[in-house]
Amino acid sequence: MKRYVWGVLFLAVGFLAAGCKSTMGTGTAVFSGWVVDQGGAGIGNARVAVNGKATVSRPDGAFELSVPGAKSYVLNISHPGFAGLSQLSRKALTKQRWRLIRAQVETVDPAGEITLKDRRPEVARIGSTRLTIPPNSLVDPQGNPPAGPVRAAIATLDVGNGEGPRDWAVRSDDGTREGFLVSYGAVFVQFTDATGSVTYQLKSGAVGQISLPVIPGMRPHAPANPQARFWYYDESDGYWKHNGDATFDAASNAYVGTVNHLSFINTDIAKFDAACLKVTLSGIPVGHKLRIRYHSGGTPFGQTPILPLDDADNAAYRLPANTNVLLELMDGVTDEILSDMIVEDPVGNPLVNTVVNTGTAIPEGDDLWPDEPYTPCHAIVIKQGLPEVEIRINELPADAFPRDNPTDDYITWAPTVSRARLVTPGADVDIVLTNDTPGIPLGGDVLFAAHAEPWPANTTATANTLALTLPGSGAWVPFVIAGKHGTPSTNDKDTIIEAHVGNAAGPIAGTKALMVRVRKNANNLTPGERARFLFAWRKFRNQGGTNYVQFQELHRLASLAGDEGHMQPAFLTWHRAMLLHVERELQKLEPTVALHYWDWDAAAPNVFSEDLIGAPGVGGFLAEPDFSPANPMNGWNTDLPFSSGELRRSTIDHTADPDGYMKPLDDMVAEWNDYGFSSSDFFFTDSFCDDVERSSHNNAHGWPCGGGNLTYPNRSATDPLFYLLHSQIDREYAFWQRAKDAFGLPVGDTLTFPFPHHYDNNGTAAAPGLFIPDADHRQKGAFLDDGLWPWDGTTGGTPFTVAERPPNTTPDPADENSPDSAPVVPGTAFPASVIRNLWPAVPTIPHNAHMIDYLGRFKPADGLGFCYDDVPYQE
């Protein structure tokens, strides 16, 4: 039965080509492999086409196809109900697994207007595509309209994770230059009959209206490119061709426009400064894959080329010139990222990480697909195998993990257990651990210490080097590191530990890249730190599930009734828990991000700028802050019905020094030794906790906001400035804790918090007078072991009293405009830390006591995993 693939609609905002080794074809080329779904299960009856010849996969997904030899091959794979896939190659590809993304399928009436909106759970992170097609606009290959209902499939794709076509070759309008496309997003749409055997196309003169979301990786860059082009993919030659125009819509974070050709279609920016990488395998078996991600500098791109490694020498084509890319080695069968890849760049020089530069552009007019030996390409070597010394971060001596986990290589000023071993058994080896050469690359540094079990309380690493003897058996040797105060990281994995043989000047036998991740003064962020910070907030706001809107609602509900989070001892601990939860959610999206703070003891012009949290607006006393078009905060509307829609702040000059409007930090630290107030009257200031709330916190909410969002607890968290403000409040708490040694008092194996220096756990803050200290009627948060709402899952209590715990709020599923404002809890404990050696190891109901020793000074595993740039672990 004849199948048609030219009617597949793949709308993308795309880029980049990855090619394989050249085979000047004569004779026959044999393609083989498996077509599988996202879970790895085989897909039968998938159509596999190469250069016009086709076959279908067997029930287990396996296929084999012989085609005439050629200089290049265009591989296309499709199946009803799945998004298509394409790969351009110079040689036959064998034994590869090709993963298709399942689409949303529904039946539509072609006689009426058709509107498709992708509602699959997978779109929560990348956004949903909407496509509208006029009535009676579909035809079959012979030009006949459908006789009845048609089957519609849609799947918004994340090209940043390798979904969809993997090649992005383009020619200039006059056909004289070749280049690549810069990707911003993708969607797959297909119309067929009920059996999937006939595919329908738009008839001549008909156009579809499309709103296509920008993928997370390109959202910081889309506002700077308000106009882009649509391109369609020509399956016969593997090139994208101009097919219309698109405009970026900041409100929906999508490109919008029209399409008139239902094929693989992109909305992209064309570039013509293409480079290529020559990738030579050393000890890596063929059949693996190399994933190429944008890292820094040069031309940012959103898609992720995947290069099949089917020869000793391979070439990745049409990469942007002079751009840093991160290379990841993938298992050819499971797609698992293999953490033991070593990159030599230049050849013979092992790197401390897997970031390489793509090199200079191929001269205009030269072939962007140079043949072997790929002389114009930047040459690198990749090896699978470990260095002589392997170093792992955040692993305990007893851990038996078969592979390193690169997602936990993030530390603070607090001590972190690490370990090292000899990879190849032999004689014992003496090594010395050091930091890399200062400034090469520019990044963070660590301090070292010998390991002790149990780790002594209030002790951290303090040495610049550490000598270890690694046994010839390959057994792990534990040691401890901590970020060196004053030298935090500015980018991911920019802190390098070196293992030198014999002494600190000896040859390097192994390295480890990590990040010293700290909360910083937002006024001093580098452009890269600022961009990643804003990018993470935008992703957090737009994603489904746990998101920014839920935390808006969480803070509003917590401010009701007994108001657990304000005007009582839990003010600082409750907000610390909220900040920690939000910070960890942001780090799932962008691991380099921390909750940076607004320091109001001085002017902060870079904070209140169009490039960060917004410059003061104009027009009356209150106005929407001004953002630059490229700022991910641009168009940031609030989501809750009571929060006025757009951000509102006062129009005073926020860039100026507040000049003591908020009480200076040094004054409060010097003035108070007690944490919590002993009087039932909160407005009688007699401790650090209530002074910082009244004299700093309350004034800070009012100074930039007046009558705007930030002024009122029921809507203050709708403004992202809320988090910079509260991170500053938590910094003041951390500063006071260090000054007063207010982290707890070890008594045996227990950490206690005796009054008055730490936290009032003897009931005096709840009595006498206003509050009654009993099980049913007491001020929540007055006691160390109170479970914090909403993570404790409680509701009820006497309405409008201090005992009331407000119920969750449920959106209206029948109203698509209803905000997704239900907080993640009640009913959900505080999530387990993704870094296993931090609190909590398992989902836990947090108490006030959990929030005090944030550095884990008593037990490192009880630390919370954050710190501040100017608050060291110890003097």
Image: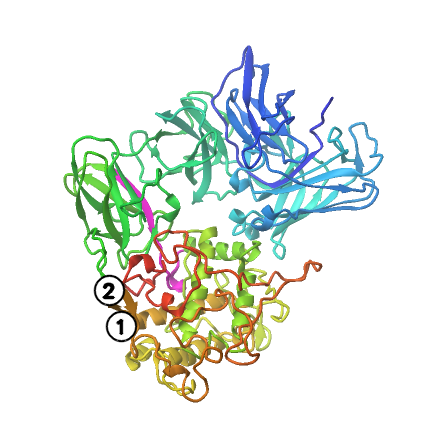
**Local SS, label 1:** helix
Where is residue 445 drawn, in percent x and y? 27, 52
Among the 4 quarters of the image, the one containing residue 860:
bottom left
**Local SS, label 2:** loop
Residue 631 can be seen in this image: no
Residue type at tag 1: Ala
Q: Quadrant of the N terminus?
A: top right
The residue depicted at 50 percent of the width and 31 percent of the height is 18
Where is residue 662 drawn, in percent x and y? 40, 78
The residue depicted at 44 percent of the width and 80 percent of the height is 774
* Separation (CA) of disc 1 from disc 2: 10 Å
* Left or right relative to 582: residue 541: right
In-front residue for pair 552/530: 552
* Comes first in the chain, label 1 or label 2: 1
From the image, tell me which residue sits under label 1.
Answer: 739
Neighbour class for label 1 at 10 Å: few (<14), some, many (≥20)?
A: some
The number of numbered discs placed on residues in the rendered structure image is 2
Residue range of the region highlighted in magenta in the rendering = 510-526
Neighbour class for label 2 at 10 Å: few (<14), some, many (≥20)?
A: some
Q: Is residue 819 above or below residue 221?
A: below
Q: Is residue 551 above or below residue 147?
A: below
Residue 377 can be seen in this image: yes
Among the 4 quarters of the image, the one containing residue 141:
top right
Where is residue 5 drawn, in percent x and y? 69, 29
Colour convention: rainbow
